[in-house]
Amino acid sequence: MVEKTALYRAVDDREAEIVEFMREFLGIETENPPGRNYREGATFLADALTDRGYQVDLIEVPDEVVGEHYPDRTAHDRVNVLARKSGDGGGPHVQFTGHFDVVPAGEDWSYEPYDPVVENGRIYGRGASDMKSGIAASLFAVEAMEAAGVSITGSITQSMTVDEETGGFTGLGHLVDEGHITQENTDYCVYTECFGSDRVCLGHRGVLKFTVTAHGEKAHGSMAHDGRNAVMAMSEFLSRVDEYEERLHRRRTDLPVTPDESRRADISTTMIDAGYSENVVPDRCEASFYRVLVPGESVEDVRGEVDSMIAAAEEATGRRFDYDEIMYAEPASVPEDCTVSQVYAENIGTFHPDPSFVVSPGSDDQRFVVNDAGVEECIVYGPGRLEQAHVADEYVLIDEITTAAKVMAAATMDLMEAAG
């Protein structure tokens, strides 16, 4: 049996390589939206995996599939990476998966977001925490295992996907739809999103993003009686949303969603658009909403609740309201006592005295594996902190990446040996 200290040394021996890998990876501007440079990012990863002995496939997403989910983005290639390394024996099939798209960098950076800087033990760059560091950790974890002499008794798959930041339907969702992740080919799955090297994430809340448009009739402001003000109609709908929000706050989950305030269901009005000029009664008013679901709720039920509010507003105002859906994600969660969760918690304890179990306040691609592929042995574990996601001057601690890689290596060895 390989001693775990040998695994840890193998990771430490590769720290400089990890940093260089991250510098190159972060330098590829894979912004989403709209989905820039996905092919370049996929090729970079495919080369790194091929060099490490994986059988690699680039999974091209057909234009019609892209058009179904993102009709305004078909000009940008959608390319996912799927790589497998098989060994001898009847060991388990372990899959690491993560996304390599990043949100737009935005303004107010002290550093160039796509010219990574290494400073004071940190790597700065867009995607450093969310979540290119997770991909790096899983890649070097397996490399360290092999360098230390661990036998792969089953298989290890690395899937690296696109479009998570806008729903994941053409990324991990597409791989699941195409049968690349199933109960037959995946026994344990680790989604390497940024939740810190000290925590096991068991799942996430869900979300429904949608718009509602209130319709009216235009008129000159001096003769408002000739029109129907869509803003006032929307005000009627918003008053119902306020009442709905109060009811939602009473829907709480006992699962360990972090922070505690996020254990409740919620809805936010996030954008409102109306009017043409200060002297024209507006004939339309559009509002956008972000509805958060706690585990136990379903998107179908939420749609019904929104439909009821729209019907009530139409009856009260005599105006027409339209509903348009932007994206949705069902909640997902797995038991704290599932095998992969417990194995990871035990190995985290080597580096952190009190590993914790959490549920994410936001949604991620774990749902495709758990809800759609039916793989219940699936956790979220990766370096970086959720608080660093999507912010200016995003960074990840180098020590976080190496610690996460050590935990991944040791936990994977345990899973392989337990099956052997």
Image (spheres, helix red, strand yellow):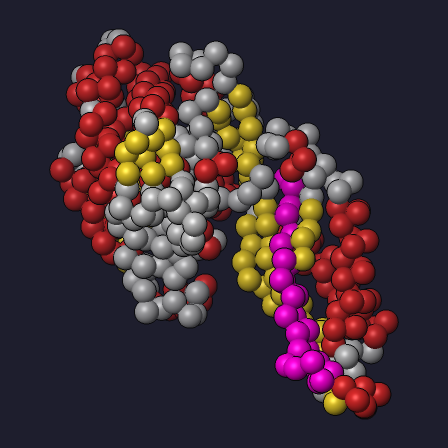
In magenta stretch: residue 291 = yes
Q: Is residue 356 left or right of residue 186?
A: right
Q: For this rendering, which residue is in front, 420 or 356? A: 356
In magenta stretch: residue 2 = no
Q: Quadrant of residue 413?
A: top left
Image quarter of the C terminus:
top left
**Residue, x 42% and y 18% (percent of image)?**
348
**Residue, x 82% and y 78% (percent of image)?**
318
Q: For this rendering, which residue is in front, 155 or 255? A: 255
Residue 43 image position (x, y, % from top left):
20, 50
Q: Is residue 276 left or right of residue 121?
A: right
Q: Is residue 238 left or right of residue 366?
A: right
| Depicted 347 relative to depicted 271: above or below | above
Residue 214 image position (x, y, % from top left):
71, 74
Stretch in magenta: 270-297
Q: Quadrant of residue 154?
A: top left
Q: Is residue 294 left or right of residue 45?
A: right
Query: Can the viewer see residue 170 in this picture?
Result: no
